[in-house]
Image (tube, rainbow, N blue to C red):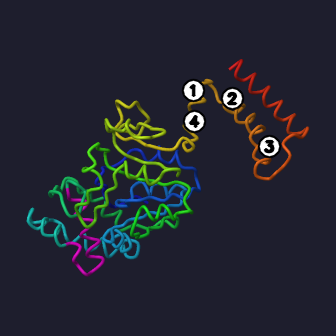
Amino acid sequence: MRTPFRSPLGPTKASAAIEKCIPVGSVVSTYGFYSGEVELYLSNRGRFILSHTTKEAVFDIWQTLFDDPISVSEIASRILPFKGDKDFEILQEQWYKYRNAPARAALFFILNNCSDSAYISKGKLDLSNYNPVSLSRLKKFVKPENFHLQLIESVKQNIIEDNRSDVLFFHTERYQKDFLSEGFNRGVEEESMGLREILTLIENRKYVILTTPSPFLSELDIQNMIFIDQYGRETTEANAKEIILHNAALCFIYGLKYAYSFFDSGWGPRFYIFSLSFVVMPVLFWYFMNENFFTIKNMASVFLATIILFIQMRFK
């Protein structure tokens, strides 16, 4: 199921790369929810998504879409075409005051798809952004069972109290060094969190952050970056259109790809993982289960694993 809404941050080609960073079955908490592009993509691929927004307007729109997408699409189909910029501007100022929930959701959809900014309360009329396919997506929208949206008061407090999530996900705007450019809200539907603020909140948590290139990213304490080009492929920093920031412990598949390129085959990584398991598991059982580490079985396993590692490193 694809989203019927556009993202103010632009359409992303990085969803597949983000998917590789998050194991199947993971519980993923996302913040600053808006268009739902990445969140719905992940929920359709075996991840459990807990999305959050502090904006009641956004929460109400999505709840209405969950409950009655057909009514929302029928109203939206009657709104177009606009007679001119003036009608568009009036709706931008008044849309959230409509009492009828499906009408508000329909206006959100139309303003989002016909604005040059993809925001609802600002932007100029640009009908070239409207795609009739989006109206079909709106009508046929079905909420995935493993997707949930919550309205929260504070992102910071929610992250502190969150003990259910395996990974935190954020889709944030381009990092600017000037702190005045971060976290600046302009409309009732807008929720903007600066990258510096996010990194402070998620210290010691597993995270994946999608953003765009900035010359100032090197000044931040970021463990790993994956550079994505305009086609969704991994590339160099110079050719990147999007950047995935993540913890080193995630993205296992990227480490495996590096190991594969290092050994020029898949056997090297297999032997390494196989051998290390004979070393790691006795240590874990000793630490967590209080099992004696110095047994004949463990010592023999560690000895054989060491030999295998030595042979693999010596004759790689």
Residue in the foreground of this view, choosing between 135 and 225: 225
Q: Main secondary structure of the magenta part?
A: helix
Dot 2 or dot 4: first in sequence order is 4
Dot 2 or dot 3: first in sequence order is 2
Residue 254 is situated, as x and y percent measured from the top left of the image, at: 54, 37
In what element is the residue under mark 2? helix
Name the residue carrying label 1.
261
Q: Are marks 2 and 3 in contact (CB under 8 Å)?
A: no
The relative height of residue 66 versus residue 29 in the rendered view (above or below) is below
**Left or right, 137 with reference to 79:** right
User: How far apart are the alpha carbons under marks 2 and 4?
Assistant: 15 Å
Examine the structure image and report whether residue 167 is included in the region drawn in magenta: no
Residue 164 is situated, as x and y percent measured from the top left of the image, at: 56, 63
Q: Dot 4 surroundings within 10 Å: few (below 14), some, or many (20 or more)? A: some
Dot 2 or dot 1: first in sequence order is 1
In what element is the residue under mark 1? helix
Residue type at the position of mark 2: Trp
Name the residue carrying label 2.
267
The relative height of residue 139 versus residue 125 in the rendered view (above or below) is below
Residue type at the position of mark 3: Pro
Name the residue carrying label 3.
282
Q: Residue at x 57, y 26 (%)?
A: 261
Residue type at the position of mark 1: Ser
Residue type at the position of mark 4: Gly
Dot 4 or dot 3: first in sequence order is 4
Residue 200 is situated, as x and y percent measured from the top left of the image, at: 43, 51
Name the residue carrying label 4.
255
Residue 226 is situated, as x and y percent measured from the top left of the image, at: 45, 38
User: How far apart are the alpha carbons under marks 4 and 3?
Assistant: 24 Å
Q: Residue at x 40, y 70 (%)?
A: 151
Which mark's residue is nearer the viewer, 2 or 3? 3
Q: Residue furthest top?
A: 315
